Amino acid sequence: MKSFNMMTKEVGGYFGLELKSGKEFHSASIHLNTDRNCFEYLIKTIKSKKIFIPYFICDTMLERLKINKINFEFYHIDNELSPIVSSEILKNNIFLYANYFGLKQNIVSNLSSKYTNLIIDNSQAFFSPHIMGINTFYSARKFFGVPDGAYLYKEKKKLIILEEDHSLYRMKHLLIRLDSGVEKGYKAFKLIEKSFMNLPVRAMSKLIRAVLCSISYEKVQSVCRQNFLYLHKKLQNINKIWINISNLNAHMVYPFMTNTKRLKEKFIKNKIFLATYWLNVLKLVDEDQLEYKLVNKILPLTIY
Protein backbone atom coordinates (compact mmCIF):
# COMPACT_ATOMS: atom_id res chain seq x y z
CA MET A 1 0.00 0.00 0.00
CA LYS A 2 1.33 3.46 -0.88
CA SER A 3 1.86 6.05 1.82
CA PHE A 4 -1.02 8.47 2.36
CA ASN A 5 -1.16 11.18 -0.27
CA MET A 6 -1.68 14.54 1.42
CA MET A 7 -2.28 16.40 -1.83
CA THR A 8 -5.79 17.69 -2.51
CA LYS A 9 -7.51 18.89 -5.65
CA GLU A 10 -7.77 22.48 -4.43
CA VAL A 11 -5.06 24.97 -5.44
CA GLY A 12 -4.44 28.38 -3.86
CA GLY A 13 -6.64 30.25 -1.39
CA TYR A 14 -4.43 29.87 1.69
CA PHE A 15 -1.60 27.70 2.94
CA GLY A 16 -2.17 24.29 4.48
CA LEU A 17 -0.39 22.58 7.35
CA GLU A 18 3.25 21.83 6.65
CA LEU A 19 3.61 18.16 7.57
CA LYS A 20 6.30 15.71 6.59
CA SER A 21 5.16 13.33 3.86
CA GLY A 22 6.22 9.88 5.01
CA LYS A 23 4.76 6.44 5.53
CA GLU A 24 2.62 5.07 8.33
CA PHE A 25 4.06 2.27 10.45
CA HIS A 26 1.02 0.03 9.90
CA SER A 27 0.26 1.11 6.35
CA ALA A 28 -0.97 -2.34 5.22
CA SER A 29 -3.72 -2.56 7.85
CA ILE A 30 -7.37 -1.51 7.94
CA HIS A 31 -7.41 2.11 9.14
CA LEU A 32 -10.09 2.84 11.76
CA ASN A 33 -10.84 5.61 14.24
CA THR A 34 -10.32 3.92 17.66
CA ASP A 35 -8.98 0.68 19.11
CA ARG A 36 -12.33 -0.12 20.74
CA ASN A 37 -13.91 0.20 17.31
CA CYS A 38 -11.30 -2.17 15.89
CA PHE A 39 -12.59 -4.67 18.44
CA GLU A 40 -16.19 -3.95 17.51
CA TYR A 41 -15.35 -4.32 13.80
CA LEU A 42 -13.96 -7.76 14.56
CA ILE A 43 -16.84 -9.01 16.67
CA LYS A 44 -19.28 -7.85 14.00
CA THR A 45 -17.50 -9.96 11.38
CA ILE A 46 -16.43 -13.01 13.42
CA LYS A 47 -19.09 -15.54 14.33
CA SER A 48 -18.67 -16.81 17.86
CA LYS A 49 -21.00 -17.98 20.63
CA LYS A 50 -18.65 -16.72 23.32
CA ILE A 51 -15.52 -14.59 23.69
CA PHE A 52 -13.08 -15.02 26.58
CA ILE A 53 -11.52 -11.79 27.85
CA PRO A 54 -9.15 -10.98 30.74
CA TYR A 55 -10.35 -9.31 33.92
CA PHE A 56 -7.38 -6.98 33.53
CA ILE A 57 -8.64 -5.03 30.52
CA CYS A 58 -10.11 -1.64 29.73
CA ASP A 59 -13.88 -1.41 30.21
CA THR A 60 -14.25 -0.13 26.63
CA MET A 61 -13.84 -3.73 25.45
CA LEU A 62 -16.68 -4.83 27.75
CA GLU A 63 -18.76 -1.93 26.53
CA ARG A 64 -18.47 -3.11 22.93
CA LEU A 65 -19.37 -6.69 23.83
CA LYS A 66 -22.46 -5.57 25.71
CA ILE A 67 -23.61 -3.19 22.97
CA ASN A 68 -23.36 -5.99 20.40
CA LYS A 69 -24.94 -8.53 22.79
CA ILE A 70 -21.96 -10.89 22.60
CA ASN A 71 -21.72 -13.58 25.28
CA PHE A 72 -18.39 -13.36 27.11
CA GLU A 73 -16.55 -14.84 30.05
CA PHE A 74 -13.62 -13.50 32.08
CA TYR A 75 -10.31 -15.21 32.79
CA HIS A 76 -7.48 -14.43 35.21
CA ILE A 77 -3.79 -13.87 34.49
CA ASP A 78 -0.80 -15.03 36.51
CA ASN A 79 2.26 -13.19 37.86
CA GLU A 80 3.86 -13.20 34.42
CA LEU A 81 0.62 -11.78 32.92
CA SER A 82 -0.03 -15.05 31.12
CA PRO A 83 -3.63 -16.25 30.68
CA ILE A 84 -4.89 -18.85 33.14
CA VAL A 85 -7.12 -20.88 30.85
CA SER A 86 -7.35 -24.44 29.61
CA SER A 87 -6.24 -25.48 26.13
CA GLU A 88 -9.82 -26.61 25.53
CA ILE A 89 -11.08 -23.05 25.97
CA LEU A 90 -8.38 -21.72 23.67
CA LYS A 91 -9.21 -24.24 20.96
CA ASN A 92 -12.97 -23.77 20.91
CA ASN A 93 -13.61 -20.09 21.60
CA ILE A 94 -12.57 -16.64 20.44
CA PHE A 95 -9.95 -15.49 22.91
CA LEU A 96 -8.79 -11.90 23.55
CA TYR A 97 -5.32 -11.36 24.96
CA ALA A 98 -3.70 -7.98 25.67
CA ASN A 99 0.00 -7.51 25.06
CA TYR A 100 0.43 -5.78 28.41
CA PHE A 101 2.72 -2.74 28.27
CA GLY A 102 4.12 -4.18 25.03
CA LEU A 103 6.18 -6.58 27.14
CA LYS A 104 4.38 -9.83 26.36
CA GLN A 105 5.27 -10.53 22.74
CA ASN A 106 6.67 -13.90 23.82
CA ILE A 107 3.23 -14.89 25.15
CA VAL A 108 1.57 -13.54 22.00
CA SER A 109 3.94 -15.59 19.84
CA ASN A 110 3.42 -18.72 21.92
CA LEU A 111 -0.38 -18.45 21.78
CA SER A 112 -0.30 -17.68 18.06
CA SER A 113 1.81 -20.76 17.32
CA LYS A 114 -0.89 -23.01 18.79
CA TYR A 115 -4.20 -21.26 18.17
CA THR A 116 -5.68 -19.13 15.40
CA ASN A 117 -8.95 -18.03 17.00
CA LEU A 118 -7.18 -15.21 18.85
CA ILE A 119 -7.67 -11.48 19.02
CA ILE A 120 -4.50 -9.69 20.10
CA ASP A 121 -4.93 -6.28 21.71
CA ASN A 122 -1.72 -4.42 20.89
CA SER A 123 -3.05 -1.06 22.09
CA GLN A 124 -0.05 -0.83 24.42
CA ALA A 125 2.33 -2.36 21.89
CA PHE A 126 2.33 -0.19 18.77
CA PHE A 127 5.71 -1.44 17.55
CA SER A 128 5.15 -5.12 18.27
CA PRO A 129 4.90 -7.09 15.02
CA HIS A 130 1.62 -8.39 13.67
CA ILE A 131 1.68 -12.19 13.32
CA MET A 132 0.20 -13.47 10.08
CA GLY A 133 -3.11 -15.25 10.55
CA ILE A 134 -3.95 -13.52 13.85
CA ASN A 135 -6.51 -10.74 14.24
CA THR A 136 -4.63 -7.84 15.85
CA PHE A 137 -5.32 -4.18 16.54
CA TYR A 138 -3.20 -1.17 17.53
CA SER A 139 -3.88 2.29 18.93
CA ALA A 140 -2.12 5.36 17.54
CA ARG A 141 -3.44 7.84 20.11
CA LYS A 142 -1.88 5.93 23.00
CA PHE A 143 1.59 6.49 21.53
CA PHE A 144 1.46 9.73 19.58
CA GLY A 145 -0.05 13.22 19.66
CA VAL A 146 -3.27 12.38 17.83
CA PRO A 147 -6.80 12.34 19.32
CA ASP A 148 -7.83 9.12 17.59
CA GLY A 149 -6.64 6.59 15.04
CA ALA A 150 -6.20 2.82 15.15
CA TYR A 151 -5.02 -0.03 12.94
CA LEU A 152 -6.56 -3.46 12.44
CA TYR A 153 -5.12 -6.59 10.85
CA LYS A 154 -8.07 -8.82 10.06
CA GLU A 155 -7.38 -12.22 8.58
CA LYS A 156 -10.77 -13.20 7.19
CA LYS A 157 -11.49 -10.85 4.37
CA LYS A 158 -15.11 -9.97 5.06
CA LEU A 159 -14.95 -6.19 5.14
CA ILE A 160 -17.38 -3.46 6.18
CA ILE A 161 -17.82 -0.35 4.01
CA LEU A 162 -17.30 2.56 6.36
CA GLU A 163 -17.91 6.29 6.43
CA GLU A 164 -14.73 8.30 6.95
CA ASP A 165 -14.33 9.97 10.34
CA HIS A 166 -13.47 13.65 10.92
CA SER A 167 -11.08 14.47 13.75
CA LEU A 168 -10.83 18.26 13.63
CA TYR A 169 -12.97 18.87 16.72
CA ARG A 170 -10.98 16.38 18.79
CA MET A 171 -7.74 18.34 18.45
CA LYS A 172 -8.46 20.97 21.11
CA HIS A 173 -6.56 19.39 24.01
CA LEU A 174 -3.48 18.86 21.83
CA LEU A 175 -3.43 22.50 20.75
CA ILE A 176 -4.01 23.75 24.31
CA ARG A 177 -1.13 21.60 25.56
CA LEU A 178 1.16 23.02 22.90
CA ASP A 179 0.14 26.60 23.71
CA SER A 180 -0.53 26.54 27.47
CA GLY A 181 0.60 23.21 28.97
CA VAL A 182 -0.88 19.82 29.80
CA GLU A 183 -2.85 20.91 32.88
CA LYS A 184 -4.75 23.58 30.93
CA GLY A 185 -5.80 21.03 28.33
CA TYR A 186 -6.77 18.20 30.69
CA LYS A 187 -10.47 19.15 30.90
CA ALA A 188 -10.74 19.15 27.10
CA PHE A 189 -8.90 15.82 27.01
CA LYS A 190 -11.40 14.21 29.41
CA LEU A 191 -14.35 15.47 27.36
CA ILE A 192 -12.87 13.99 24.20
CA GLU A 193 -12.20 10.68 25.96
CA LYS A 194 -15.84 10.60 27.07
CA SER A 195 -17.03 11.23 23.51
CA PHE A 196 -15.49 7.94 22.33
CA MET A 197 -18.16 5.98 24.20
CA ASN A 198 -20.75 6.49 21.47
CA LEU A 199 -18.43 6.99 18.53
CA PRO A 200 -19.46 4.72 15.64
CA VAL A 201 -16.98 2.53 13.76
CA ARG A 202 -15.52 4.70 11.01
CA ALA A 203 -12.49 4.83 8.77
CA MET A 204 -9.54 6.88 9.99
CA SER A 205 -9.79 10.56 9.09
CA LYS A 206 -7.56 12.28 6.53
CA LEU A 207 -6.23 14.57 9.25
CA ILE A 208 -5.02 11.70 11.45
CA ARG A 209 -3.49 9.84 8.51
CA ALA A 210 -1.60 12.98 7.51
CA VAL A 211 -0.22 13.44 11.03
CA LEU A 212 0.73 9.78 11.33
CA CYS A 213 2.57 10.00 8.00
CA SER A 214 4.68 12.83 9.42
CA ILE A 215 6.10 10.89 12.38
CA SER A 216 9.70 9.68 12.49
CA TYR A 217 9.01 6.18 13.80
CA GLU A 218 12.68 5.23 13.97
CA LYS A 219 13.35 8.20 16.24
CA VAL A 220 10.40 7.31 18.49
CA GLN A 221 11.58 3.71 18.78
CA SER A 222 15.13 4.78 19.61
CA VAL A 223 14.06 7.26 22.30
CA CYS A 224 11.62 4.79 23.87
CA ARG A 225 14.21 2.03 24.05
CA GLN A 226 16.86 4.28 25.58
CA ASN A 227 14.50 5.69 28.21
CA PHE A 228 13.05 2.27 29.02
CA LEU A 229 16.52 0.81 29.57
CA TYR A 230 17.56 3.78 31.69
CA LEU A 231 14.56 3.38 34.01
CA HIS A 232 15.00 -0.38 34.13
CA LYS A 233 18.62 -0.03 35.17
CA LYS A 234 17.57 2.25 38.04
CA LEU A 235 14.42 0.40 39.14
CA GLN A 236 14.74 -3.29 38.27
CA ASN A 237 15.88 -4.31 41.77
CA ILE A 238 12.81 -2.75 43.43
CA ASN A 239 10.24 -3.32 40.69
CA LYS A 240 7.63 -5.91 41.73
CA ILE A 241 7.05 -6.80 38.06
CA TRP A 242 9.74 -8.94 36.46
CA ILE A 243 10.68 -7.51 33.06
CA ASN A 244 12.53 -9.45 30.39
CA ILE A 245 14.58 -7.08 28.22
CA SER A 246 16.14 -9.76 25.99
CA ASN A 247 13.73 -8.91 23.17
CA LEU A 248 13.14 -5.25 23.95
CA ASN A 249 10.74 -3.30 21.76
CA ALA A 250 9.70 0.36 21.82
CA HIS A 251 7.16 0.51 24.62
CA MET A 252 4.49 2.99 25.67
CA VAL A 253 5.52 3.18 29.35
CA TYR A 254 7.81 1.57 31.90
CA PRO A 255 5.53 -0.34 34.32
CA PHE A 256 6.85 0.17 37.82
CA MET A 257 5.02 -1.85 40.47
CA THR A 258 5.63 -0.69 44.01
CA ASN A 259 4.21 -1.00 47.50
CA THR A 260 5.29 2.56 48.33
CA LYS A 261 2.16 4.51 49.26
CA ARG A 262 1.34 7.96 47.88
CA LEU A 263 4.22 7.81 45.41
CA LYS A 264 1.90 8.74 42.55
CA GLU A 265 0.88 11.92 44.40
CA LYS A 266 4.57 12.87 44.69
CA PHE A 267 5.00 12.43 40.94
CA ILE A 268 1.97 14.61 40.20
CA LYS A 269 3.20 17.29 42.64
CA ASN A 270 6.35 17.44 40.54
CA LYS A 271 4.28 17.70 37.32
CA ILE A 272 4.90 14.10 36.28
CA PHE A 273 1.42 12.91 35.35
CA LEU A 274 0.71 9.18 35.43
CA ALA A 275 -2.33 7.23 34.26
CA THR A 276 -4.06 4.41 36.13
CA TYR A 277 -4.94 1.17 34.27
CA TRP A 278 -7.87 0.23 34.68
CA LEU A 279 -10.14 1.37 37.51
CA ASN A 280 -13.09 -0.68 36.24
CA VAL A 281 -11.20 -3.86 37.22
CA LEU A 282 -11.56 -3.01 40.92
CA LYS A 283 -15.29 -3.72 40.63
CA LEU A 284 -14.74 -7.13 39.02
CA VAL A 285 -12.22 -8.85 41.28
CA ASP A 286 -11.49 -9.25 44.98
CA GLU A 287 -8.85 -7.20 46.78
CA ASP A 288 -6.55 -10.20 47.25
CA GLN A 289 -6.47 -11.06 43.54
CA LEU A 290 -3.59 -10.12 41.26
CA GLU A 291 -5.60 -7.89 38.93
CA TYR A 292 -6.69 -5.71 41.85
CA LYS A 293 -3.07 -5.28 42.94
CA LEU A 294 -1.94 -4.47 39.40
CA VAL A 295 -4.42 -1.60 39.16
CA ASN A 296 -3.47 -0.12 42.54
CA LYS A 297 0.28 -0.64 42.52
CA ILE A 298 1.50 -0.15 38.94
CA LEU A 299 2.87 3.27 38.05
CA PRO A 300 3.15 3.56 34.24
CA LEU A 301 6.19 5.79 33.91
CA THR A 302 6.29 7.86 30.72
CA ILE A 303 9.26 7.12 28.46
CA TYR A 304 8.46 9.34 25.45
Image: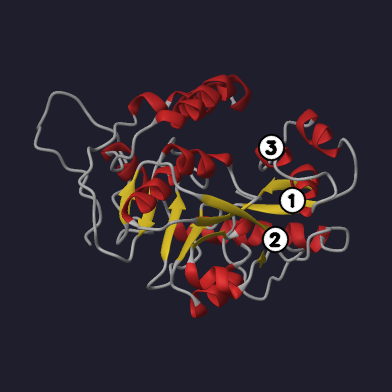
Q: SS for tag 1?
A: helix
Horizontal side of 85 relative to 43 (left or right) equals right
The residue under label 1 is 291
Quadrant assignment, res 181:
top right
Alpha carbon separation for disc pair 2 and 3: 17 Å
The residue under label 3 is 279
Q: Is residue 146 visible?
A: yes
**Closest to the observer: 281 or 141?**
281
Other-residue count near label 3 (Cα within 10 Å), few / some / many at <14 / 14–19 / ≥20? some
Q: Is mark 1 in CB contact (under 8 Å) with mark 2? A: yes
Other-residue count near label 1 (Cα within 10 Å), few / some / many at <14 / 14–19 / ≥20? many
**Residue type indicated by callout 2:** Ile
**Residue type indicated by callout 1:** Glu
What's the mark number on residue 77? Answer: 2
Q: Earlier in the sequence, mark 1 or mark 2?
A: 2
How far across and how far down the image is residue 23, in percent?
31, 56
Q: Quadrant of the N terminus?
A: bottom left
The structure residue drawn at horizontal position 28% and vertical position 43%, both measured from the top left corner, is: 203
- Judged by depth in the image, the label closer to the viewer, 2 or 3, is 2
The structure residue drawn at horizontal position 44% and vertical position 35%, both measured from the top left corner, is: 147
